[in-house]
């Protein structure tokens, strides 16, 4: 960063990520930050980061994989993050093992948003028995109920809510209207996006002969460290005991996690996926968009349920497997069946022809 | 409850439901409360309620059905709620017709959360023309608009919203950021979980040749008594007239109910189910997770649509039937088809063999 | 409007749309407003608008198409909007090309809700550097962050949120708890329904060998003019660049739009539809309820994905086509396959019979 002593934190304008006027960074700085090798002049000055289609001469861009090589050639980008010199298409570049990872690293350097100033707004509603560690930032309209604890440097945006006796770790962000209900626990470095709800009651009722009687939901949700919970996603508290979201797991928007579910570490739950009560997910499981998991099902380590896939109640998806369809089947099977399903009208016609042929043959015979 | 005059309301700690130190309850007290017969010493002291896997010597647990008998034997629980003496595995127990119902009853006795103190926060926004019955509790940041009515003992948590002219019955709870929009009506003893939205506009547009013209949505939502509406669930107001949620119906999280839908009494709508406009559901209907109902469809009394099942527009699901798949078919049919679908590649191969055989035969002949 | 000088804006009561006592409108006024021809006495006085089933002698109703002719005959409505004289069933009526459009026009005349009074509540949280155009209405508990701009006559309801540097156009409504996050832009005449979230982070992570590393999401969402965004719907900001919702597009509740998605003009996204990252939708595309679009897929102009339909990653749906099922196929194909799928057990049995027959024949031979 060459322009004066101010650290260059380029503000994005209209969706671009650009350095303020007069600020720039060099190809060499990028190479050092991401641990890569520069191709071309390390002193090359760049002012922004952009996708291939939108990048101009002052922009750094990235080539995720070789399939993008053509788009890289056609791009107006001034320099590229690439996995191999061939992908650079003759442009100045930084060669790294994983260009997408390098992009993540560099964007964090160049564009981390300024955290809000520490302090508790006079218009926040913080109960006198709540315990706030140093450096917390609690906005107007946020609420912290009796006995709750908020870890150091954690940020509550307007309308965020921490219920009675709940605990939030250090360096968390609860975005607008995100809620952690009573007694639930959230580990360090978690992000709850707007409208996320942690600890609403599980859907537990029992028919008593004339009405659905509520089974009080007295457990909690325990969210481990480094978890992200997407906008308007809902995670229900356990009937008794805990619903658990394992360390490092990332959850997208509008996902439903039922009561008593256990999600392992470093799993990915994509948008609108749903997990019924008491299901278990291992580590590094992936649920693609709109996938549905039945109650008491088990999705073992590293398994993937593809988009709209459905695993039935008490179903088991073996470690490392990829399943698709409803009811879910191994993905290759699913593709084969889908292909044959498309040919089913033809198969039926062929069957009918054989029947006619044999009928004629038997008459003829 | 033996410990002094304080009524034992054990606070849950870390997801367990335990009596405060020094408090306990006895097997005999449990038996009386749930209307069951004790096996073993009625004076046996217990201090908590826990699931079988987590229960220790001081805990009461429950055996939902005989399939759990092995887990009951292996459990460390001090006593059990069971349907028959065999399920007690030799432990002290209370025999009742429905152990899950007994659990619901006992948890309500032992762990009902303290309601917030009545009163209106100075930081609540209550219009001067709103009418509040006695005993209401309205938190900081909650809003009650002009002409709205709030029934006795009803609780509005932070960020809860009651629109102009809306009516909320007695003993309701509107959790954090739950909203009931203008003129909608909610009956007694309803619970709206965080972020639930009752009375947003129905999705009604008509193409006018150059744009989607909005059809003003001037009806309401009428929610009858004893209804639960899950976190971030949305129920749209009717174009004209009413969208209706019948008495005793329980709705899970992230469910969508379109405009002019009528849901009968005591139905269950599980997580992420969706109901398109003008569909009708009878009494005691169950929609499992992610089920979808097309517009103007009719799901008759007692019918079940299983997970991810889809009923087409104007489709009819007969009373008492169970349907699955998309388009939905009777569940047994669905299972049969799914099984044959899995064998479809094999069927195709067999068909081809027959064709070859006959081709050879006809050449040979 | 005959009753005095007050313009008749009938308040709806209990889900009906009725004129206040003493006010009425005439059949002739309706005909003029909607550009139709009256059948019967243009002076006929009416006091409300209702659906066919609920309409009484004082009510105007409408007959959307000929399929409703029987219900029109049986209706108690005093007058009807119809497409042809036959559909009027002998009642007074107004004949128009599109009765549903006429209904939309007339409801807007007769029942447009009173907008809130302009002004900024003392209990709103508006940063001193925010710029508010004239006529804005900002409710208690709403927040406008630093550098944000709010266009003329735009309304922020309680709990609504506009982030740092965001821009909202003229004549918009942000309903309760709707949020537009930092730097996002919303065009004129847009409505965000309760709990809608525009500009939450895209779901972008890259595995770094031991954890899912976040790819900072530094782009924005740009919402063009005349867009509606349903309750609790979520639209993610782009990694870099823009997620775009085209002019005139209407989005229902609980819809998920991933990062870098481009939605064209005048499209319709129905409840619980989901669009994965970098997908592109053309103009006048329809996604029916619970439809799912894979990442980088392309849905061309005028295409329709029916309810629960699933388009795979990088899939293409041709302009004007209608697709169904998962993986999505042309709708007619889908229907044919579904019909044959229902007969699959029968086909399998017939195949087996042929095999037996040939086995016997070959033995016999």
Image: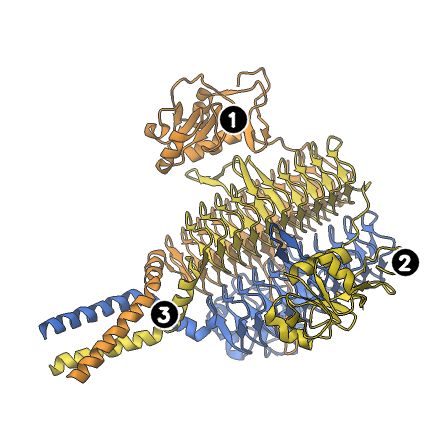
Chain colours: A blue, B yellow, C orange
Q: Which residue is mark 3?
A: A339
> Regarding mark 3 in the picture, which secondary structure is present there?
helix
Relative to the observer, which residue lies in front, B162 or B189?
Answer: B189
Q: Quadrant of residue A350?
A: bottom left
Return the chain for callout 3: A
Return the chain for callout 2: B
Q: Which residue is mark 1?
A: C48
To the question of a shared chain for discs 3 and 2, the answer is no
Relative to the observer, which residue lies in front, B58 or A174?
Answer: B58
Can residue C257 be seen in the rendering of this structure? yes
In this rendering, the label closer to the viewer, 3 or 2? 2
Query: Residue A233: horizontal and vertical position, in percent?
Result: 63, 58
Q: Residue furthest left?
A: A364
In this rendering, the label closer to the viewer, 1 or 3? 1
Query: Is residue C226 shown above or below A293?
Result: above
For the residues bearing labels 1 and 2, Cβ distance under 8 angstroms: no
Q: CA distance from mark 1 to mark 3?
A: 55 Å
Return the chain for callout 1: C
For the residues bearing labels 1 and 3, Cβ distance under 8 angstroms: no
Q: Quadrant of the C terminus of chain B?
A: bottom left
Query: Residue B27: horizontal and vertical position, in percent?
Result: 77, 65
Q: Which residue is mark 2?
A: B4
Query: Residue C234: horizontal and vertical position, in percent?
Result: 59, 54
> Regarding mark 1 in the picture, which secondary structure is present there?
strand
Left or right relative to B308: residue A113: right
Task: Classify 10 Å Cα crowding around label 1: few (below 14), some (14-19), many (20 and above).
Answer: many
């Amino acid at each position: 960063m060459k322009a004066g002593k101010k650290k260059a934190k380029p503000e994005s304008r209209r969706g671009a990520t650009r350095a303020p006027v007069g600020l720039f960074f060099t190809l060499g700085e990028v190479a050092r930050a991401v641990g890569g090798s520069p191709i071309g002049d390390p002193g090359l000055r760049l002012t922004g980061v952009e996708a291939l289609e939108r990048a101009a001469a002052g922009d750094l861009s990235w080539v995720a994989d070789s399939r993008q090589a053509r788009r890289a050639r056609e791009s107006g980008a001034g320099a590229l993050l690439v996995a191999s010199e061939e992908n650079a298409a003759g442009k100045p570049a930084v060669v790294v093992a994983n260009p997408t990872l390098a992009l993540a690293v560099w964007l964090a350097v160049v564009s981390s948003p300024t955290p809000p100033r520490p302090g508790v707004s006079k218009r926040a509603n913080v109960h006198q028995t709540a315990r706030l560690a140093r450096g917390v930032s609690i906005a107007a309209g946020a609420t912290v109920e009796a006995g709750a604890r908020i870890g150091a440097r954690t940020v509550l945006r307007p309308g965020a809510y921490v219920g009675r006796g709940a605990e939030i770790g250090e360096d968390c962000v609860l975005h607008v209207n995100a809620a952690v209900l009573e007694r639930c626990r959230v580990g360090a470095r978690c992000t709850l996006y707007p409208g996320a709800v942690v600890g609403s009651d599980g859907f537990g009722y029992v028919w008593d002969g004339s009405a659905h009687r509520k089974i009080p939901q007295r457990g909690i949700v325990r969210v481990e460290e480094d978890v992200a919970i997407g906008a308007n996603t809902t995670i229900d508290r356990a009937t008794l005991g805990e619903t658990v979201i394992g360390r490092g797991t990332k959850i997208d928007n509008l996902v439903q996690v039922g009561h008593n579910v256990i999600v392992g570490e470093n799993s990915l739950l994509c948008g609108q996926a749903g997990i019924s009560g008491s299901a278990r997910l291992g580590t590094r499981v992936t649920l693609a968009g709109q996938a549905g998991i039945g109650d008491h099902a088990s999705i073992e380590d590293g398994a993937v349920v593809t988009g709209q896939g459905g695993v039935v109640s008490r179903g088991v998806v073996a470690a490392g497997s990829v399943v698709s369809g409803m009811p879910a089947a191994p993905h290759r099977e699913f593709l084969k069946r889908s292909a044959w399903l498309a040919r089913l009208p033809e198969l039926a016609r062929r069957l009918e022809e054989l029947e006619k042929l044999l009928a004629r043959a038997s008459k003829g015979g």
